[in-house]
Every structure is written in C-alpha cells, then in structure tokens.
Image (spheres, rainbow, N blue to C red):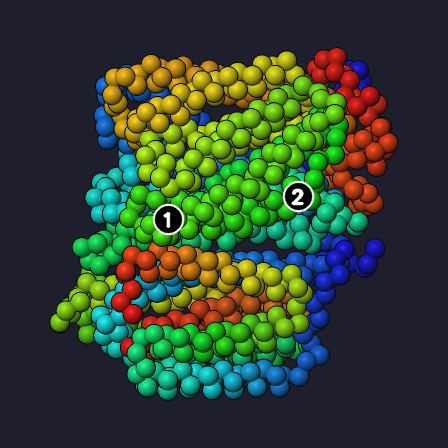
C-alpha cells in the first residue's frame, strides 16, 4: 500500500490515479461544453450562411476594437492561469495568489468591456424585442443576428462569472494554504478557464469579424 | 436457519451501517444513491403510467368522451416526457448502473462520489419543475416540443417542463461522466477492457451518448424558452427562422437518447442469458464493440425522424441509408445472444423469462424500425400507431423488461433477500402477455392508417383499440406485482447468500448486501469473464462457493449445483 | 492500474507559455487584419475559422497540457469536436440541398 497522501480519497489506490481521474473528468465535462456552445454555433452558422448580407450588416455594428481588446485580455488571462497552475505545482503560494488575482482582474476587465459594449448596443437600439430598431431591409434577419450575439456572449459571460466566482473562492482557500499539498483543483480550474477562453476565440471572429 | 438468518441480518452492510435520514440524504455511497434513484424513477413510472391509463381508457371508444381534446394532448405529452426523461433515460444507468459499476469493477466507489450525490439532487430539482408543470395544467406540445407550436402558439406550461428536462439533463451528464471515468480509471488489477462484463461495456457506451448528446438538447430547450418569452424568431418562419432547425437540434440528442434507452437493457440481457444458460457469451468482443458502434452510429441517423418534415430528400436518403447500417450492431447482439443459448443449460428463472422476452420483443421492435427507416414506407406510417407500436416494443418490450429482469437478478445483491420466485415468474408472464396484447394491435392500426396523438378515431379501429386497452390493464397488473412482492421480500423474503445464482462477476464475490466499502480486500482478476463452462464446474474466486446456495424461495431449482 | 501517467507541472520553465502567448497575440492581430481585407463571406469565414482553430490548438496543446497527456485525454479532447463536426456536417447537408445557402 502506498502511504496515504493527505488529499487521497478513500476509493483511489494512489494519488496519481486520482489526479488522472480528475483530469479526465474535467475533460469529459469540457466535451459537454463543446457541444453545448457548439449547438449554438451550428445554429448561428446555418443562419449566417442563409442570410449573409443582413448578418454582415448587423455585425458591422459591433465594436471590433473593443472585441479585439477583449480577446487580448482573455488570452492574457489564460497565460496567468497557466502560470498559476505552474506556481501551484511548485507550491509557491505567493506567486499562486498573485497570478490568481491577476486572472480575476483580467476577467473582471473583460466583463467590464463587454458590459460597456452592451450599453453601447442599447444606446444604438440593437437589443432584440426590447428596443430593436433597424433601418433598411433585412430587419428580422438582423434581429436574428443580434439574438445570437447577445445569447452567445451572455452565455459566455455567465461562464466567465462562474469562473471568477470559483477563482475568488480558490484565492481564499490558497491564502489559507489549501493548495500546499494538493494542486489538482488549480489544474482542473485551469482547464475550465482555458476552455472558456477558447469559446471566445471562436466567438470573436465569427460574430465581429465576418462582415 | 433462524440463527443463520439473524446472524446474517446482524452483519454490517451498506444498508444497516446507519439508519439516519442524514446518512441517506447526504450519502456518497454509490449503492445508496442507486436506491435513492430507484425510488425517484419508480415514482415517475407511476405518474407516466397514470397518464397512459387515461389515454388507453379514452381510446376504448372512437369518440372523445372521457377527456377533452386539449386534455388528451396534455396526457400524451406528459406520458412521453415523464417516461422518457424522468424514467427511461435515468432508469438502468442511475439505479443498476450506480449500484453495480464499482462492484463489477472491483472498486470501492465511483470515481466522483460527491458528483454522484449531486446528480441525484439535480434530478430531483429538475423533476420539481416537471411536476410543477404537470400540476399547473400540463403541456400539450407532445414530448417532442415541435416549433412553432411550442414556441408561439401553445398556451400551456412549456417553459416549466422544458426547464425541468434541462435541469435533469445535467443529472444525466454527471452520471455519464462518472461512469466513463470510473471504467477508465478504477478497474481492479488484472481487469483489462476485454475482461469487463458486457453490462459495463453497454453502460460505457450509454454514458458516451449521455455526455455528448444531452448538451445539445439543453441548448435547444433554452432556445425554445427564449423564443417563447421574447418572440425572437429563431424557429419562426415569419421572422426568417426555420422550424426544422429545431427538429435537427432536438433529434440530434433525442435519437441517440433512444439508444440511451436500450443499451443498458442490452447489457443486462447479456448478463442474464449467460448466467441462466451457463454459457459464456458467443462473440464477446463483437457484443462489446457493438455497444460502442451503436453509440457512435446512433449519432448519425437523427434525420430519420424528419422524413416528412420538410427536410431535403437528399438528406433524407442519406439518413435512411445510415439508419440501415445502425441496425447491424443490434442484430449482431441478437444473433450472439441466441447463439449463446445453443447447447446451454437453460434455467427458467424470472430474470431469464424477462431476458428471453426481451430478445423476441426487441427483435420485433428493431425489425419494424427498419420499416420506418425505409423512406417511402415511413411517408405512409409516420405519425401513425405503427410508430407508436415500434418504439413501445423497444422501450417497453425491450428496455423495461430488461430493467425488471435486472432488478430481479440483482435483487439478492441489493437487498440481501430473495424475491418469491413463483410470483416473479407469474408477473413476468403477465407482463409479456399484457404487453403483446397492448401493442401488437397497434402495428395493425397504424398500418391501416390510425393516426397517433388523436383522441378520436374512425369506428373501424375500435376492436383493435379495445384489445389494446385490455392488454394495458393486464400489463398494469403485471407491473404492480413486482412493486408489491419486492417490497414484501425486503422484510419477509428468504435471506440470500453471496451468490444465489452461481453467477460470475465480481459483484457476486462479496456479500449480499455488500459492505459499505464493497470489498474487504481489493479483488484481483486473472481470468476472462463468464467462465461458466470451462471446467464444467463453476469456481468463483471468493470464499463462498455455489454450495452455499440457500434453497429458500427458489423452489427446487438447483442453480449451479 | 493503468500505465497512463501525467507528469507534474512543476519542473517546466514558463518560457513555453510566453512563447505560446506571443503566438496567440500574433494570430489575433492576423485575424483582425484579415477582416479588413473584405474577402467576402466564404473566404472570410474560412480564414477566420482557420486562425481560430490554430489559436485553439495552441491553447489546448500547451496551456491545457494536452501535449504531454495520455492518449485517453487526447481521445476525450477530440471526441467533443468530432461530434460537433457531425452535428454541423449533417445539418449542412440538409440546408445545402434545400437551397438555404446563398453563398
């Protein structure tokens, strides 16, 4: 019998098995998320291919610059998360706390920019069924574009909010020394965060750039 | 015998390790969670069954005289939604699956015990929404929620039911993730993939479907809710939307879902037929891999539900072709089960009766599926009772019978008691007879043109409808019996030994019921499964031999002696 | 016991992360520039998707450590995307043959 590791659950025979099971479990969950967002992408692709002009016209109302900045923000946050996972593995508590805090900051920055974009879109009367006003033809299709835009980005933002909330809890736990013996939760969280980043990597060009 | 009984009852098992409500409601023991699910899905089976009863009563006469048309629409919707999402999809994976997967693998628990408990609470939470929808007045869209009726025109509680299913879907996903990782990572030493019981293979394949398909349904239901609330037009042609897009997204999950609703049953049958013919399975690898093939191919055929929807003919032809291919792995299983029986020593126990019934009824259901996969035939029988009969043959004649067979087979392991064999056989026969009387006439009715989802019908269809309802009442009686005698057996049934059936499999190497940690020592596997006839005598690993069989209520059947 | 192993992340220098990060930013610049070229919908989508896929692959392989992961992990990663491809692919067969796409 291997000696008991403080983090070893009773039904696993050793810590390596537990680590692999946890990683695979998170990947299985991420696979479900691929299909969750993917179904929306599929529907969006159908309508975009059916109505290229109204969708392009609608998409041109989005703020490419802010979108690009937000993409850079998220990519940076992926960097900080990757470094945080490494810091956890090296049991470097201070570096871990710093990097997790940086990630939270970047996440909040992303949400802030997104919120500002939503506010701009509200001012331009582009919110479907709430204040949508479209000049020219293809109004229903343009509204369809914005439906997808808001639904997909809000779903993404929800995943960001959940991620930030979990990260805040993890910062608190890390501050208490909770990851001194077990860095698996940080790794798992990292996988989740990177995945949310990947969703945005696809959202940005498909919503903002194909105009 | 009395001393033996009380000694066994005193023995610590997962059931008596603690009696508090907290120990049940906060358990992470996969066996207890399996029982929690058993209670929940039985409740939903009853609810779905009540709806079915009212449907069959209404259909005794050609006129609509029992309920109004609107109520009838709600009845068949609720019957379908409850039976599919709150009974059949969870059934075997969450009850027998949760209970047996770690045992069969020689593990102490599932990979993620707390996720397991969370999945049950999520299921309950989702079911509250569904119940709320039913109590508030129900849904009338059909369990398929086709747009634009469900999104624009229906005045019933669609969103509540959709949200209930959405939430319950997460329960499905959590269970699937748990099973997949457990099979990958928690196998006992020596238990390689091709030594796994076929039940595990089928649950693994089922979990693949649950994990990869359910998210698409989740998004689709969210879109329906969104459209209902905001009227955006994703599925509304007047606003540029396509109602068929809904069907594509819906059936991308719901077709594989029907494989969720049969694969676990097939896994059970593999266990039952091998045990009760004392033979290893014919073509083990083929049966194992056919489960995975069904899971994969099942994702490629969803358009065969949409032949008359307005989908393009070319897409229809493609889906029709692939649907023929997906029948092949199922057929392989039926051939192999049959070949397993050849030169076997067949015991006519209750589980075996269910298993043999399954093989026949599933074959009929599966073959009629080929009729429906044939595009031109489907054009005529789509939305008729032919389709209804087809899927009930598979889901009820197949899956429910496999479920009951499995419950009976593993009942000694789960409860530590033997059920009364005479009653078991009687119920199995009643169910078989009742089932066929209920659903065979529906093939004829459908072929002759009786549409589904109507509360009235042409008078010439009445005779067969009366047969069908009569059959349903026999079927209902058949279902009530196990409910009663299984409950009875928990208190008055004969005490079971570790391995009353003389079956192979690691779950039989531990006590009935098992201790909380499943095994005192981690088992080591060094031979292939289903070693029924190798030496002519069954030699299990464990310390108890087949000679420990308790005669009890098993009658004179000397299993394995 | 399986023979799958996952090395601990502690002995790696962070250099690879910075390199990948720079590549990701570079690809971001590329995709924004490409959008200004006004290549039309088909080419536009194709280029944008290709760049996005490249970025995703970088994140998956390096940030998510899939490059050093077991074959089982690779299978899990691939499965989600393959299934999504099936959904999109077969749906497109229908829409294409119904004349929905005015590409």
Residue matched to label 2: B286
**Residue B35 sits in which quadrant?**
top right
Q: Which residue is mark 1?
A: B316
Could you tell whether B63 is left or right of A159 in the image? left
Out of C12 and B32, give the one closest to the viewer.
Answer: C12
Query: Between residues B295 and B80, which one lies in front from this camera angle?
Result: B295
User: Would you identify the image quadrant in which residue B356 lies?
Assistant: top right
Q: B426 or A122: which is nearer to us?
A: B426
Image quarter (top left, top right, bottom left or bottom right) of the N terminus of chain A: bottom right
The C terminus of chain A - image quarter: bottom left
Q: Residues within 10 Å of mark 2 (few under 14, many from 20)?
A: some
Per the model, the C-alpha gap separating discs 2 and 1 is: 29 Å
**Pick the front one: A28 or B339:** B339
Q: Residue placed at 56% from the left, 16% from the top?
A: B429
In primary-sequence order, the first of circles 2 and 1 is 2
- Could one spot residue B44 in this view of the protein? no
Which of the chains bears the disc numbered 1? B
Residue under the image location 79 percent in, 23 percent down: B560
Q: Is residue B35 left or right of residue B240?
A: right
Give the image location of residue A87, x and y in percent: 63, 77
Q: Quarter-wise, where is residue B132 in the image? A: top left
Q: Is residue B359 visible?
A: yes
Secondary structure under badge 2? helix
- Image location (x, y in percent) of residue C77: 56, 64
Local packing at callout 1 (Cα closer than 10 Å; few below 14, some 14-19, many 20+) is many
The secondary element bearing badge 1 is classed as helix
The image shows residue B348 at horizontal and vertical percentages of 67, 19
Q: Up-down: is B404 above or below B219? A: above
Q: Residue at x 42, y 60 (%)?
A: C89
Residue lying farthest left?
Answer: A136
Identify the residue shown where x is 26% and y is 39%: B156
Report x, y in % for residue B128: 40, 40
């Amino acid at each position: 019998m291997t000696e008991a590791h403080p983090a070893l659950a009773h039904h696993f025979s050793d810590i390596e098995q537990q680590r692999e099971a946890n990683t695979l479990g998170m990947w299985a969950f991420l696979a479900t998320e691929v299909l969750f967002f993917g179904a929306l992408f599929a529907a969006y692709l159908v309508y975009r291919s059916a109505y290229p002009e109204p969708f392009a016209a609608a998409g041109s109302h989005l703020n490419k610059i802010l979108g690009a900045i937000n993409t850079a923000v998220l990519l940076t946050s992926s960097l900080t998360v990757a470094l945080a996972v490494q810091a956890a593995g090296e049991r470097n508590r201070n570096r871990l706390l710093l990097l997790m805090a940086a990630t939270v900051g970047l996440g909040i920055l992303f949400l802030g920019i997104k919120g500002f974009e939503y506010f701009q879109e509200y001012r331009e009367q582009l919110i479907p069924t709430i204040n949508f006003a479209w000049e020219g033809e293809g109004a229903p299709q343009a509204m369809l574009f914005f439906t997808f835009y808001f639904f997909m980005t809000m779903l993404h933002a929800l995943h960001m909010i959940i991620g930030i909330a979990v990260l805040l809890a993890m910062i608190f736990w890390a501050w208490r020394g909770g990851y001194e013996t077990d860095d698996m939760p940080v790794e798992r969280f990292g996988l989740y965060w990177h995945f949310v980043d990947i969703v945005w990597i696809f959202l940005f060009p498909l919503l903002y750039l194909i105009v | 015998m009395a001393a033996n009984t009380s000694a066994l009852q005193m023995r610590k098992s997962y059931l008596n390790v603690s009696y508090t409500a907290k120990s049940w409601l906060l358990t992470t023991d996969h066996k207890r969670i399996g029982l929690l699910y058993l209670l929940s899905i039985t409740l939903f089976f009853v609810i779905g069954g009540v709806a079915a009863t009212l449907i069959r009563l209404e259909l005794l006469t050609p006129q609509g005289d029992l309920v109004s048309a609107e109520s009838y629409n709600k009845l068949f919707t609720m019957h379908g939604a409850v039976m599919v999402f709150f009974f059949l999809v969870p059934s075997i994976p969450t009850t027998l699956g949760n209970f047996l997967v770690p045992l069969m693998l020689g593990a102490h628990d599932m990979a993620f015990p707390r996720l397991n408990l969370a999945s049950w609470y999520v299921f309950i939470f989702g079911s509250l929404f569904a119940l709320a929808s039913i109590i508030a007045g129900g849904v009338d869209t059909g369990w398929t929620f086709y747009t634009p009726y469900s999104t624009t025109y229906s005045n019933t509680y669609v969103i509540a039911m959709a949200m209930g299913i959405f939430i319950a879907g997460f329960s499905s996903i959590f269970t699937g993730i748990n099973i997949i990782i457990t099979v990958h990572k928690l196998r006992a030493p020596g238990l390689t993939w091709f030594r796994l019981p076929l039940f595990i293979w089928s649950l693994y394949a089922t979990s693949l479907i649950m994990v990869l398909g359910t998210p698409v349904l989740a998004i689709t239901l969210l879109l329906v809710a969104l459209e209902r609330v905001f009227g955006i037009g994703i599925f509304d042609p007047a606003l540029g939307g396509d109602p068929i897009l809904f069907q594509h997204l819906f059936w991308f999950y719901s077709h594989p879902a029907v494989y969720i609703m049969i694969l676990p049953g097939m896994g059970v049958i593999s266990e039952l037929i091998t045990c009760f013919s004392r033979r290893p399975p014919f073509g083990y690898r083929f049966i194992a891999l056919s489960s995975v093939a069904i899971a994969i191919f099942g994702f490629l055929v969803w358009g065969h539900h949409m032949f008359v929807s307005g989908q393009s003919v070319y897409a229809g032809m493609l889906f029709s072709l692939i649907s023929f291919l997906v029948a092949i792995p199922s057929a392989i299983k039926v051939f192999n089960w049959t070949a397993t029986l050849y030169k076997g020593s067949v015991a006519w126990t209750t589980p075996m009766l269910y298993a043999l019934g399954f093989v026949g009824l599933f074959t009929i259901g599966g073959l009629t599926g080929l009729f429906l996969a044939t595009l031109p035939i489907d054009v005529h029988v789509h939305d008729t009772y032919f389709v209804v009969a087809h899927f009930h043959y598979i889901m009820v004649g197949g899956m429910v019978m496999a479920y009951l067979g499995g419950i009976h087979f593993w009942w000694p392991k789960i409860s530590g008691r033997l059920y009364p064999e005479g009653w078991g056989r009687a119920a199995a026969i009643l169910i078989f007879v009742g089932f066929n009387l209920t659903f065979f006439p529906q093939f004829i009715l459908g072929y002759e043109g009786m549409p589904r989802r109507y509360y009235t019908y042409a008078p010439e269809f009445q005779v067969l409808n009366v047969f069908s309802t009569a059959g349903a009442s026999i079927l209902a009686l058949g279902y009530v019996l196990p409910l009663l005698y299984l409950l009875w057996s928990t208190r008055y049934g004969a005490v079971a030994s570790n391995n009353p059936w003389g079956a192979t499999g690691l779950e039989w190497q531990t006590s009935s019921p098992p201790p909380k940690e499943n095994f005192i020592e981690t088992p080591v596997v060094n031979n292939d499964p289903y070693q029924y006839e190798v030496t002519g005598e069954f030699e299990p690993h464990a310390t108890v031999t087949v000679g420990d069989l308790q005669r009890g209520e098993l009658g004179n059947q000397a299993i394995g002696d | 016991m399986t023979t799958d192993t996952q090395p601990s992340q502690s002995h790696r220098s962070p250099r690879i992360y910075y390199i990948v990060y720079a590549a990701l930013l570079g690809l971001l610049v590329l995709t924004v520039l490409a959008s200004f070229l006004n290549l039309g919908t088909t080419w536009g989508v194709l280029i944008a998707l290709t760049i996005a896929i490249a970025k995703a692959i970088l994140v998956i392989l390096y940030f998510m450590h899939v490059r050093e992961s077991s074959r089982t992990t690779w299978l899990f990663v691939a499965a989600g995307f393959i299934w999504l491809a099936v959904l999109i692919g077969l749906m497109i067969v229908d829409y294409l043959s119904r004349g929905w796409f005015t590409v």
